[in-house]
Amino acid sequence: MATPLTSPAPALTDEGGRFVLAGRPLAPGYRLEDTARFDDDSWPLTPVLLQAHQARTRLDFTRAPAVFVPALKDFFAAMLSGELPPNEPRPKPMSIRRHFTEQLRFTHWVASRPGRPRLADLGVDDFAAYALHLHAVLPAEASREVAQSAVRLLYRYRTVLPGDRLTVDPLDCEHWGNSTRRTRAENTTLRIPEQVMGPLLTWCLRIVDDLASDILDLVHADRAHQAAGRPGHARPRVHFSDAWPHRSRATGATTTVPGGPAVRADTVTLGRLLQGACFILIAYLSGMRDSEVKHLRPGSARALLDGAGRPYRWMITSLAFKGEHDPAGTAATWIIGSPAARAVAVLERLRPDSASLLFHSLSHHPSPRPGAMTSRSSIDLINGVITWVDAYCRHHGFEAPIPDVNGRPWKLTARQFRRTLAWYIARRPGGVIAGAVQYRHLGIQMFEGYAGTSDSGFRAEVEAEQAMQRGEQLLALTSDHQHDLRGPAAAEATARLADLHHRTGFTGSVVTDQARLRRVLARHDPEVYPGTYVTCVFNPDKALCRPTTTANGNRALPVPRDCRPLECRNVALTPDNANALATEAQRLDARLHGRPALAPLLHADLERRRDAIRTFLTTAGEADR
């Protein structure tokens, strides 16, 4: 197991100088004596990149202003393997590379200003000017936050830098940090809009389920031609299903020369289309991170069978990195749906024999890049699905199946799928149950499996979405003044919501400051949990569910899946709750009087449920009078 470097590495040197990667775990095939030394103009970081999808990278100090190179070398040597400031974590290699980009931006800006040749000469006015410069060159707030955070690291590392260093904290600048107020817990990743996600998922399912066989036939035939080295021999005949137009019509290719470059490019395009559709299905229906998807190997998916030999659950194994102690990754397992399992099976047939990972780079060359595709390549891959679908529909005169957003095609990133899945699970009626039902999963435990056996944090993302939704619902309830609450806990709900309204001062139901709402709920949570059928006014002493504690163990929480709403004294009803219960009773009544007739035991059970709902609604209404 590789061990992350947390303390200064030994001062390993030779005649070429100190090794700046000393003490860090090296990827297979690298030796410390072949890595960068302090005096080198360029420090390759590839030897310490332990994830297969990470692109080759380096710190090239020839790109920095010469006057700042000594200071930057001291700074990055400390980050890589030197002494760290107190309580400062050891940064990961790719984080260091991102910091390097921002230090280049900052030092070139400083070098362009008259009379400011050293970091130690910079003052508050300089940081104010740089903050204004960032607003001009970086429209995105998140990008400005990254840039400012990187610069402030120079101040945080000042105690371990032997030469030129910052002496003024950028945070002392009035204009500094306006774009860095976001808390670490906030998720700023955009979720994919519903009008995009629905058609995109449908097309990916069609590509994987209906079109994969034909694409794989083409890919395998083309590989056979390349392996044989006989481009003049006839290509094996491939028949297309009715659902799939001929390859030349679908892709615009006009040549039919077997093994020719145009056909090969055409085949690679279709292979990448299939690969992209598989990536989307796996990422979206598993909750896995990009790095976790990229490290899938053949045989990573397996099905659990019932007594009759039918699959009822699918599991997938990969490597997890975030939150793990081993920088080389820790084996983890996720529960997935059958569409994701089918996508894995397709990828196993798509990969060349020489590829050890499912998401290898497809190219026109017989020997593709080793390892997994990079993050930039996968972004191109998944956006290529939308591009291909749009071109295909235009070619055949169909309406655009994946609509634009604000007049432009939606730009996908791998992180958006996890974020969108968390949103759907939290925001759809039934909360956690929606995670089991919405995607045809077989039980609530399937949602539990989204988090995998690793510390993936997916549960935290879902809970954050649920908390935000609850805050918005409570805000709407407080603005309604609670005239219509019914049920055994109606009076308690009214009192708690009135207190929340008094403390928050929110006057409307439109959330314009989500950060403020989060802070208010953290300090003055009324412990009221709106739901589809009931509103829980939580009191652990009365709860009939099995209350759980928060992660820090400070307070109990209700367990929605164990809710007994018709019996619990913690229940209050909004008008929407009462309507939902009445609709459920009507549905049961229609089922009881429908044809064919139900079995006696089932009929009696449904009849009891219907009568219990109606009795509960009547009792709640009478108590409210």
Image (cartoon, helix red, strand yellow):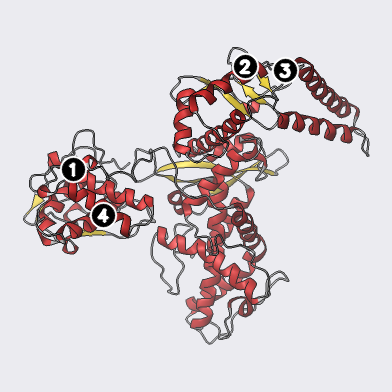
Q: What residue does disc 3 label?
A: 567
Q: Amino acid at mark 4?
A: Glu
Does 256 appear above or below 336? below
Q: Amino acid at mark 2?
A: Glu
Q: Nearer the viewer, mark 4 or mark 2?
A: 2
Q: Nearer the viewer, residue 30 or 212?
A: 212
Q: Earlier in the sequence, mark 1 or mark 3?
A: 1
Left or right: 582, with 386 as reference point? right
Q: Position of residue 560 (x, y in %)?
A: 63, 27
Q: Earlier in the sequence, mark 3 or mark 2?
A: 2
Separation of marks 4 and 2 at Cα, in angstroms: 53 Å
The residue drawn where x is 55% and y is 56% is 280
Q: What residue does disc 2 label?
A: 492
Q: What residue does disc 1 label?
A: 155
Q: Earlier in the sequence, mark 2 or mark 1?
A: 1
Q: What residue does disc 4 label?
A: 102
